[in-house]
Amino acid sequence: MSARAYVAVLLIDLHFPEAGSLKGKRKELQSVKAQLQRRFGASVAEVDHHDRWQRATLMASVCGGTAGRVQEGADGIARWLDGRFPAGVSVATELASFEDLRNGPSRAVG
């Protein structure tokens, strides 16, 4: 297979200092997830801190045919989150090609 395909995976830690309940956090979090999907075409899932009122960890991914375009998408997500949560966001990004993933170390899932 010679098709070029790239993916950026982002691990996003959010802080909601104004949230006084899980319900308040969920409302804000649903808005963030929807915006990431609409604005950037990202796939998004909450992966940690489900029961914490003021914290959430999301994983998001964007994919495309060039590393540059995928990196631009990931950078756009980070900038947007930084603007929305100036004192309460941390974003870690990994970029890989399909070949990187295919030829990387084998990892058991489960």
Image (cartoon, rainbow, N blue to C red):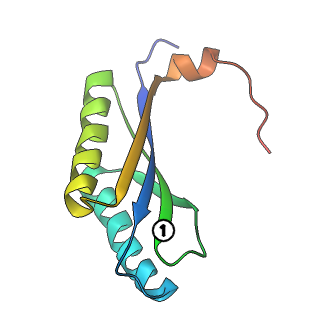
94 to 62, vertically: above or below: above
In this figure, which residue is indicated by the disc labeled 1?
55
98 to 14, vertically: above or below: above
Asked where in the image residue 84 lies, by quadrant, the reply is: bottom left
What residue is at 26 percent from the left and 39 percent from the top?
75
The answer to whether any part of residue 110 appears in the image is yes
What residue is at 48 percent from the left and 68 percent from the top?
55
10 to 22, vertically: above or below: above
- Residue 81 at what x, y percent from top left? 27, 55
- Residue 100 at what x, y percent from top left? 54, 18
What residue is at 40 percent from the left and 82 percent from the top?
19
Q: What is the quadrant of the C terminus in the image?
A: top right
28 to 109, vertically: above or below: below
The answer to whether any part of residue 66 appears in the image is no
**Crowdedness of circle 1 by 10 Å Cα count: few (<14), some, many (20+)?**
many
Secondary element at tag 1: strand
- Residue 99 versus residue 95: which sits nearer the camera? 95
**Count of numbered badges drawn on the protein:** 1
- Residue 103 versus residue 88: which sits nearer the camera? 88
Identity, as a three-letter code, of the amino acid under mark 1 = Arg
**Seen in the image, is 19 located left or right of residue 55?**
left
| Residue farthest to the top, as pictured | 2
- Residue 38 versus residue 58: which sits nearer the camera? 58
Asked where in the image residue 85 lies, by quadrant, the reply is: bottom left
| Residue farthest to the left, as pictured | 83
